[in-house]
Amino acid sequence: MSALDRLMIGCILAAAALVAGTLGLRHYGADRYAAGHAAAVAAGKEARDSQAVANLAIESGLRTRLLEQDTTALRKEQEYASNIEAAQRRVRAGVDGLRCPAASPVPAGTAADDRPVAAGLVVEPAGPSLMPEAAADLLGDGAAVAGLVRRYERVIQRFEACRAVNAVP
């Protein structure tokens, strides 16, 4: 064999070794990539599942707390309604009454030019009484407005509670 033949065989063997090495590294690298990808997916699923369990616990606690608040609010609303009904019955029966404020030309806190303002409680003279049915309607309207305000405040409290839960990292 001549030197040229040996050189050509050496080059062919080197090229074959290079191709075999490249294919081996690609196969090994693909296996490692697939294994790493599978491990990352499994870790992500595990983290997601543990976070879901934690979120369910937080949500359950919030729902329990809101249910207690709703129960308390319902009890108070029923108590308010019975108190208003009792007050309206007393007003209609004439036991209690509502009066209009008396019209006074000078406000109680205004001083005359030559004397100081009187200190202490100023009692206004009683004005005319409202008709019993009008007084009962006025009590009902006031109770309705107060109920709206209480419901609005409960909505705000719920919103703040939900925002606090969502703010937890």
Image (tube, helix red, strand yellow):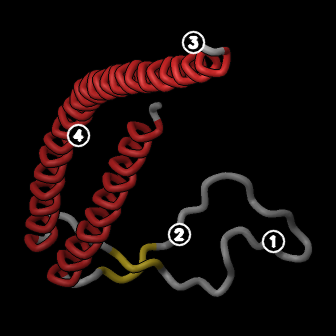
Q: Quadrant of residue 136?
A: bottom left
| Residue 157 coordinates in the image, percent (x, y) | 37, 47
Tell me which label, 4 or 1, sits earlier in the chain. 4
Which residue is rendered at x = 79% and y = 63% of the image? 117
Q: Quick one: label 4, few (<14), some, or many (20+) residues within 10 Å?
A: some
Instruction: Name above or below for residue 102 compared with residue 25.
Output: below
**How far separated are the C-alphas under marks 3 and 4?**
94 Å
Pick the front one: 84 or 30: 30
Tell me which label, 1 or 2, sits earlier in the chain. 1
**How far separated are the C-alphas under marks 4 and 2?**
45 Å
| Residue 79 coordinates in the image, percent (x, y) | 13, 48
Q: Find numbered disc 4 in the image and state the secondary structure of the residue it sits on.
A: helix
Q: Nearer the viewer, mark 4 or mark 2?
A: 4
Marks 1 and 3 close (CB-CB < 8 Å): no
| Residue 4 coordinates in the image, percent (x, y) | 66, 21
Q: Find numbered disc 2 in the image and state the secondary structure of the residue it sits on.
A: loop
Tell me which label, 3 or 2, sits earlier in the chain. 3
Q: Nearer the viewer, mark 3 or mark 2?
A: 3
- The residue that disc 3 covers is 1
Marks 4 and 2 close (CB-CB < 8 Å): no
Marks 4 and 1 close (CB-CB < 8 Å): no
- The residue that disc 2 covers is 124
Q: Nearer the viewer, mark 3 or mark 4?
A: 3
- The residue that disc 4 covers is 66
The amino acid type found where label 3 is placed reads Met
Q: Nearer the viewer, mark 1 or mark 3?
A: 3
Q: Which mark is residue 24?
A: none
- The residue that disc 1 covers is 111
Which residue is rendered at x = 83% and y = 75% of the image? 112
Tell me which label, 3 or 4, sits earlier in the chain. 3
